[in-house]
Image (cartoon, rainbow, N blue to C red):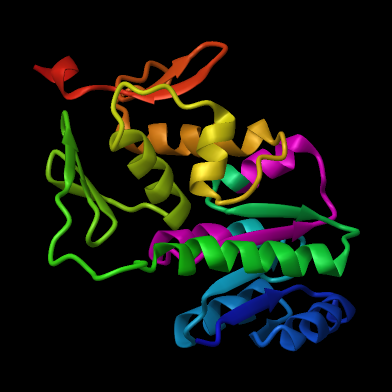
Amino acid sequence: MQRTVLLVDDNREIIELLKLFLEKEGLRILEAYNGAQAWTCIQHESIDLAVLDIMMPELNGVQLLQLLRAEYKLPVILLSAKNQDSDKILGLRLGADDFISKPFNPLEVVARIHAMLRRTYDFNEPAGPVQDTLEPTSIGELMLDHTDCVLYKAGREISLTAIEYKLLATLMNAPGRIFTKKQLFEQVWSEHYYEDANTIMVHISRLRDKVEETPKQPVYIRTIRGLGYKFAKKDDFR
């Protein structure tokens, strides 16, 4: 199946460069040169992944990301000349799945795009016969529906990105087990861990914002200092 990638940047040379490399990989490419154009495209086209520049006219990448995340779950890679950790963390907290700094190697961007498409779509495809039903995982007020990849808290639906679902499913399906950052990264991202602790920390923080009553005093997703993270057991809520 041919995947569609939306490239959004006010620098036409960057779009043309990435388009050249990505089309050679068999991907369908859509182009937008500001945030407003991109938003219109997202609403009217079937897009599998978006690459967004941060600094753009009319609607910048951060504003576009916030609009997009309110309605869509497609994976997003931020592309920006801003390479401070604070900028990367902000982008991830707002819902980006990856962050690439300019200047970049176009081959790296292509590799990141392929990895993101693989773990978002191909990784979810069943290897054998599909079961009629997958039992949901319920702990406390949380119920994770594995058939529709949806989380419910006290009956209220909570929107999750593909990465958030995989991370939460990994933790909830093994309550009480301690996962290191390396184990979580390789389980969820299906790639070798490259010592990027910020990525795991930011996604854990985003999940806590969604599932915890008091994110700074988590009940469900617990930090085990010096080791990693674990999810609460069912017995903790009896």
Instruction: Give the camera-side residue of 28 and 129.
Output: 129
Q: Which quadrant of the rendered structure holds the C terminus?
A: top left
Q: Is residue 30 above or below residue 97?
A: below
Q: Horizontal placement of 140 versus 61: left or right?
A: left
Check the image and name the residue furthest to the left: 238
The image quarter containing residue 105 is bottom right
Vertical position of residue 64 compared to residue 22: above or below:
above
Q: Residue at the location (42% across, 22% down)?
A: 178
Judged from this view, the residue extending furthest toward the front is 128
Residue at 43 percent across and 42 percent down: it is: 167
How many marks overall?
0
Which x, y percent locates residue 179?
Answer: 46, 27
Q: Where does the image place residue 112, in percent across and percent down from the top left?
A: 69, 61
Verify whether residue 50 appears in magenta.
no
Query: Is residue 48 rendered to the left or right of residue 144?
Result: right
What percent of the width, then of the height, locates residue 196? 69, 36
**Residue at the outermost top position:** 225
Q: Residue 64 or 185: which is nearer the viewer?
A: 185
* Residue 64, x across and y down, in percent: 58, 64
Q: Is residue 59 visible?
A: no
For image coordinates 62% across by 62% down, the residue present is 115
User: Could you tell me which residue is drawn at 55 percent across and 50 percent down?
Assistant: 189
Q: As rendered, which of 59 and 177 lies closer to the eye? A: 177
- In the visual, does 158 lie left or right of 101? left
Q: Within the magenta stretch, is there residue 75?
A: yes
In the image, the segment drawn in magenta is 64-91
Residue 69 visible, this angle: yes
